[in-house]
Image (cartoon, grey):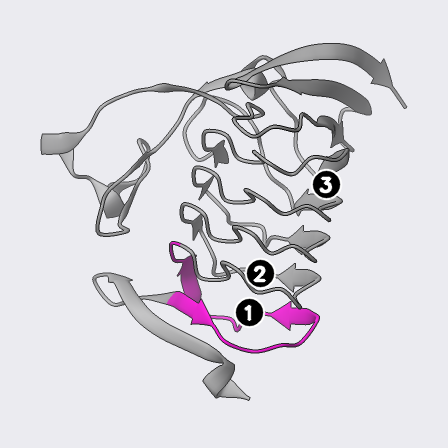
Amino acid sequence: MENRFIFGEVHQGKKSLDKYTGTEPVVEVPEGVYAINTAAFSGCASVERIILPQSCKFIFNRAFENCVALREVYTGNNLLAIGTEAFRGCKSFERLTLSNANMSKEYNSTNLGALLFSGVGRSFQIIFSGSSVDFDAMTTYEAVETFSNGDYHHPTSSHFDYSETRRTTTYYVFGNEADTDFECEVHCLADGKILKYKSIEGGCSSVIDTVRY
């Protein structure tokens, strides 16, 4: 079954998942994978649930683009960043679970890229199962930079320090450039809060409600 996965090297011996070629509805990515490369699952029409290993720290741009049956993604405890448009066009998407993630602008936090869910076109949830969430950081975010060769730059990571091309950009995490808008509930189990966002066509988003459990 190992041939379902095509592996590569993302940086100095770090293992990446470059492409998934299987047809299983549930995919458990093997331990040892450091990064999910650009478009690794793009267009995989049969995948419904993806479970990432504890070793996975980065999800690159458009990693799950147009996985039309994808409903859920579970991350490990060590994820640092998710790239731009990672879930673009995932029209069945229901839930992203970020285990023990700390959504803040501080070092070693989980950074979310621009237009992350553009084209989802339905309501869905993000579950932060541990730690706390800086809700002010969710609408816009000074986030990440992606390079043409697929390497990922995270401002707080020494692994991808391409200082000669570094720049800081403010991204709309819940922005949407597609025809259909969507709503998202961000659940923080540690804080007992739910924050509801509504995307606005053209790359913006707005907070529509904040409630407590």
Mark nearer the N terminus (1 vs 2) = 1
Callout 1 touching callout 3 (CB < 8 Å): no
Q: Which residue is mark 3?
A: 129
**In the image, residue 52 above or below residue 19:** above
Q: Is residue 25 magenta?
A: yes
Q: CA distance from mark 1 to mark 3?
A: 20 Å
Who's the residue at 75% across and 19% down the image? 195
Quarter of the rendering occupied by the C terminus? top right
Q: Which residues are magenta?
A: 17-38
Q: Which mark is residue 183?
A: none
Q: Does residue 126 appear left or right of residue 174 in this picture?
A: right
Residue type at mark 3: give it: Ser
Q: Circles 1 and 2: CB distance less than 8 Å? A: yes
Residue displayed at 40% across by 57% down: 35
- Residue 190: x %, y % from top left: 76, 31
**Mark 3 or 2, nearer chain start:** 2
Q: Which residue is the extreme one toward the left?
A: 164
The residue under label 2 is 52
Crowding at mark 3 (Cα within 10 Å: few <14, some 14-19, many 20+): some
In 3D space, how far apart are the residues under numbered discs 1 and 2 (Cα atoms)?
Answer: 5 Å
